[in-house]
Amino acid sequence: MDSLFFHPKVVHLPMALAVVMPLVTGGALFAWWRGWFDRRTWAAVALLQAILVGSGAAAMKSGEREEDRVEEVVAEKHIEAHEEAAEVFVWASAAVLVLMAVPLGLPDGRARQAVSLGAFLGTLLVFGLGYRAGEAGGKLVYQYGAAEAYATGVDGSSGFGEPSEAEEADSDSE
């Protein structure tokens, strides 16, 4: 797999799921309470949350692998702010996943409703934390210039399809 820009490729799935999960969870919860769907629907919602957690963990891992390279261009404090926001996002997502699993084992009643409502509210929190992590990552790229770490490849070629200064100098001397 192309390792160039792998982290930006991976982060979009957990971010998209963080946006969608409150809508999916709220709709499924309402339908479950009305008796339109059964527990299997809630299990599908929990599966989507598990995908969010797994893809968020993969995004964190890929970010850790690229951290040293980006530190050559961006101050460590900015990278750490993004990393810490991402960790809180993934851990909160995992906590919501656990909360989503609990109603699957509870009998019908107020306890099940309360826990599933708590899981829904948790998705709103995760959405906010995802926004915070994404905003910090966006600042790395667009405000602090993290993409510059990838602007010139190992062979001296530009990672963006444009000739690097070294390539232009070589062609001028010929």
Image (cartoon, rainbow, N blue to C red):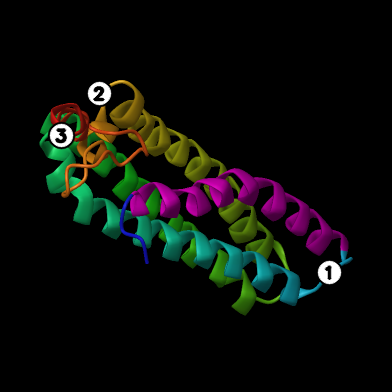
Say whether residue 142 is left or right of residue 49.
left
Amino acid, disc 2: Tyr
The span picked out in magenta is 5-34
Amino acid, disc 3: Asp
Task: Point out the tag, 1 or 2, that comes first from the N-terminus.
Answer: 1
Of marks 3 and 2, the one in the foreground: 3
Which SS class for mark 2? Answer: loop
Task: Point out the tag, 3 or 1, that comes first from the N-terminus.
Answer: 1
**Picture coordinates of residue 172, whole percent (x, y):** 18, 26
Label 2 sits on residue:
144
- Give neighbour class at mark 1: few <14, some 14-19, many 20+ (Cα, 10 Å): some
The numbered dot on residue 170 is 3
**Picture coordinates of residue 39, whole percent (x, y):** 73, 75
Quadrant location of residue 41? Answer: bottom right
> Relative to 11, does residue 38 appear above or below in the rendering?
below
Q: CA distance from mark 3 to mark 1?
A: 67 Å
